[in-house]
Image: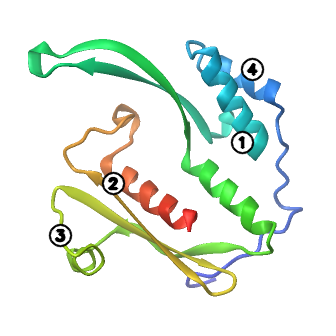
């Protein structure tokens, strides 16, 4: 097959088994044993409601350290745990919602970095301190949904020690923006 086309996935090819809230809690506690109980429960409810699985890298519990002050006066004052939906979860939720309406989607363009010409046309200016990305989705009815996202070039991304980078964050934001439409 050449080009970009909508491919129909038949239900026999992909039959996810939804995990229960209790199973999700067990997995979440095993993967993130230091996460607070309230955050584990919230994440487990999301897993149950949307058929998500932490083992499939669809949902994460991430600890963010909180700091006060600047420079050498900067010091840690606490931490906050948050539930984060991975891009795989966002895709699955969108696919489920559209499938219920008999619609499917594919990628018409991107995710990719926007050119300066596109930035000027779409945003009205060029922002060299940000990486701007674009993703265009096409549904089975021929409609197109552009999504835009950015990440500041100077801002460190969470998980950069595990391979995450600013380009990836801009791509994910643009794809999520398109999926929201």
Location of mark 4 (residue): 26
Tell me which label, 1 or 3, sits earlier in the chain.
Answer: 1
- The CA distance from mark 1 to mark 2 is 26 Å
Location of mark 3 (residue): 126
Location of mark 1 (residue): 52
Q: Nearer the viewer, mark 3 or mark 4?
A: 3
Tell me which label, 4 or 1, sits earlier in the chain.
Answer: 4
Mark 3 burial class by Cα count in 10 Å: few <14, some 14-19, many 20+: some
Judged from this view, the residue extending furthest toward the left is 72
Q: Indicate whether 60 appears above or below 128.
A: above
3 and 4 marks in contact (CB < 8 Å):
no
Question: Does residue 29 appear to the left or right of 120 in the view shown?
Answer: right
Q: Indicate whether 148 appears above or below 156.
A: below
Q: Where on the picture, by quarter, is residue 100?
A: bottom right
Q: Indicate whether 115 appears above or below 3.
A: above
Question: Does residue 107 appear to the left or right of 54 in the view shown?
Answer: left
Could you tell me which residue is drawn at 61 percent across and 73 percent down? 106
1 and 3 marks in contact (CB < 8 Å):
no
Q: Where on the picture, by quarter, is residue 173?
A: bottom left
Tell me which label, 2 or 3, sits earlier in the chain.
Answer: 3
Could you tell me which residue is drawn at 35 percent across and 65 percent down? 133
Location of mark 2 (residue): 167
Q: How far across and down, in percent of the image, does residue 5 sit?
A: 63, 82
Q: Describe the element under mark 2 as helix, strand or loop.
A: helix
Mark 4 burial class by Cα count in 10 Å: few <14, some 14-19, many 20+: some
2 and 3 marks in contact (CB < 8 Å):
no
Q: How far across and down, in percent of the image, does residue 87 sit?
A: 55, 50
């Amino acid at each position: 097959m050449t080009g970009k086309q909508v491919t129909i996935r038949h239900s026999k090819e992909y039959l996810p088994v939804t995990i229960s809230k209790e199973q999700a809690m067990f997995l979440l506690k095993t993967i993130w044993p230091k996460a607070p109980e309230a955050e584990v429960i919230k994440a487990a409810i999301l897993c149950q409601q949307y058929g998500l699985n932490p083992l499939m890298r669809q949902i994460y519990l991430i600890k963010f350290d909180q700091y006060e002050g600047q420079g050498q006066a900067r010091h840690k004052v606490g931490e906050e745990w948050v539930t984060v939906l991975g891009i795989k979860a966002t895709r699955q939720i969108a696919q489920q919602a559209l499938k219920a309406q008999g619609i499917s989607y594919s990628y018409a363009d991107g995710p990719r970095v926007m050119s300066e010409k596109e930035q000027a046309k779409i945003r009205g200016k060029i922002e060299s301190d940000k990486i701007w990305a674009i993703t265009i989705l096409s549904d089975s009815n021929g409609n197109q949904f552009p999504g835009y996202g950015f990440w500041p070039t100077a801002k460190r991304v969470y998980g950069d020690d595990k391979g995450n980078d600013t380009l990836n964050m801009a791509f994910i934001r643009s794809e999520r923006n398109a999926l929201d439409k």
